[in-house]
Every structure is written in C-alpha cells, then in structure tokens.
Image: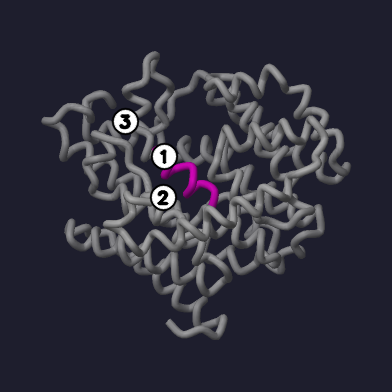
Amino acid sequence: MSKYVSHPGEIIPITKLIVKQAKLKNRLENNSPEWEWCFDLLRKTSRSFYFVILGIHPDFVRPIAVFYLIARALDSIVGANPNEIRLLQEYGNLAKCYNSLKPVEQRVITDSIKEMGFGMNEFLDQDIISLAQYDKYCYYVAGLVGINTIELTIATKVCAPFSIPEEAKRSGCNSARLLLQKINIIRDIREDLLQIPQPRIFWPKEVWSKYAEKLDDFLLPGNKQAAINCCNELILNAIPHVFDGISLYPNVSELTCRNMIGISFTMAVAMLGLCYNNEKVFTSAVKLKKGETAWIYDNCTDIASFMRLVKYYSCKLKVKMEANKEKRMELIKKCIKKCDELIRAHGIGK
C-alpha cells in the first residue's frame, strides 16, 4: 500500500474493494469442473468484468459469464491472445456450461451471438471509413451485448420488463454500450499502432483523414496537435451516448444489475475526460488509477449515487473542454442537466 501514501484518499476504497473481492470469490466454491474452468478463464481474460459480475444477483452470474465468454471467443477468431487461444482450444468446457443453462437463457445468447457473427463477418475485410460504419461496427461488437444483457436479466426474471417502448429500450442499451466500445477504441490507438503485426484500426477514416495522411503519422512528435484534435473529435462523437445511458439507467429494476451497468458506464465517462485533449493517448498507456477505480466501485450504489458520479466526471470533462475553448459544449451541458433532473427525481439533493 506504500504507493498510495501520496493519495491517502484511495487507501480506504482499495482496501474495501480487496475485502469485497475476497468475499465474492467464496461464491464460486463447490462448482463443477467446467464452471471452475469458466470462472477461471473469465478472471484471466477480464479481471474488471469478472469482479463486476461476481457482485450481481446469483441467478444472473452464470448466464452473463457464458454470454461474455462466447462473445469473446467469437471476437478471438480473427486474433487471439494466449488466454483467448485457450478459450478456443478448450471450448468444449464452455459448451457444457452453455448446455446447463435454461432454454430461455440459451435462446437470448444464441440469437445475439448469431447476429454478432453475421455483423462481424461484414466488417472482416472492410475498413471503417464513415462514422455510420463506425456506429454499425460498434453495434455488432458491443451494442448487441448491451441489448441482450438486458434481455438476459429479464429472461432470468432478475429484472422486471422495462416500462419504456421496446424501440427506446434497444436504442438506449445499444447507445450505452457504444460509449464503452468507442472509448476503448480511442484509448487503445497507440497500442494498436505499435503492435506487430499491426491489427485492424477502428478509428473512422472520415475523421482521422482530416488530420493526417495515415494513422501512423499520429505517433510522430511533429503531429502531436493534429493527433490530439482528432482524438477530441472522436470523444465529442461519443458524448451523445452518455446522455442515452443516463436516461436508460433508472429502468433497470434490480440493484446489483444496475450497479454492474453503472460501474462500467461511469468508468467509461471518466475515461472520456481522461483522454480528452491528452497527448498521452499517443505516447503511453492511459488508464484510471486503481484507487480511482476502487472509489467508483465503492460509491456506485444506487441511482442517485450513479448520477452524482456521472455528473462529477461530466463536469470534469466540461472544464477541460472549456479550457480548450471547445465550441461544441451543448451535449455535455445536456448530460449534466439530465443528471440533475434524475437526482431530483429520486428525492436526493445535489
């Protein structure tokens, strides 16, 4: 804990998170071999998601774990790290876990993966040129995950059906997940450009071609400002998804599922502010500190606290935008106003 001495406010949240994670691990004891394999691989492929889902309703842990790993396996076919290679090689274990789920849970997962597969195949040899293609690609790899995660919560009877129209529900779920996907695409640009062989880059050419002849130019010191301006434009493109996610969140009826969504969403909003006008996106790894992540975990506990967190990080982004003399301020102001409205609606002062 010595490295947190200079940030004493992070010590308590980190300690609480460590204790909580240790308790959550006990929930996985006495599982069958294939489920032991499932949760072990989930932890190794995504530690953050692993601990988020361990805290959700017990009836939802297994369906969402299987859904995540099948989606990860699908994505890994075109390029896999060692854990993902193991996932593909030992896929029989995952099939056993899937077969043990209820038919209604299997149907939601199967329908989603099928559509994801068709969509990803469409972009297999196709570069992302336009913003419309960018949104469509993100829908297939992330939006469908958001939509069908909510469908799974309803199918398992963990959450009540939404009281809003089906089209509005799908649109909101898709948009909220697009935020998470887009910030990952923005944040990972340096790592992707430096990787050998270089993977496909998903920054839309419609945007980056305004600032450089080729994407690799953004890593050159002389192109620093052009790279930052391009990054800022992509962040502005993602801000409408913040508003949609805020609006959708109160419709999730079950507390642990709402917290699962809220934690991931809040971290994405925080990353928008961290990446905005930040040259480090092109020079080093940009990520939230462990202490800050733990603080978000500790404070995202209900609708009002979620709204306060999103408002806090939206205000931080607004300050950076104002300092940069950003002209397109309407959307971030709209997000902050929506947070205030929902805080008041739930009877809690600002």
Depth order, front residue of 126/93: 93
Classed neighbour count for the residue bearing mark 2: other residues with Cα under 10 Å, few (<14), some (14–19), many (≥20): few
Q: Nearer the viewer, mark 3 or mark 1?
A: 3
Magenta segment includes 293 = no
In this image, 226 relative to 57: left or right? left
Judge from the rendering whether residue 94 lies leftward or rightward of residue 301; answer left or right.
right
Residue 182 is covered by the magenta coloring: yes
Q: Sequence order check: which comes first, mark 3 or mark 2?
A: 3
Q: Which mark is residue 131?
A: 1
Secondary structure under tag 3 reads helix
Pick the front one: 264 or 291:
291
Residue beneath label 3, please?
A: 190
- In the image, farthest residue toward the left: 222
What amino acid does circle 1 point to? Leu
Question: Tag 2, which secondary structure?
Answer: helix
Q: Which residues are magenta?
A: 176-185
For numbered disc 1, what is the local secondary structure?
Answer: helix
Q: Is residue 287 left or right of residue 254?
A: left
Label 1 or label 2, whichever comes before in sequence order: 1
Residue 290 is labelled as 2
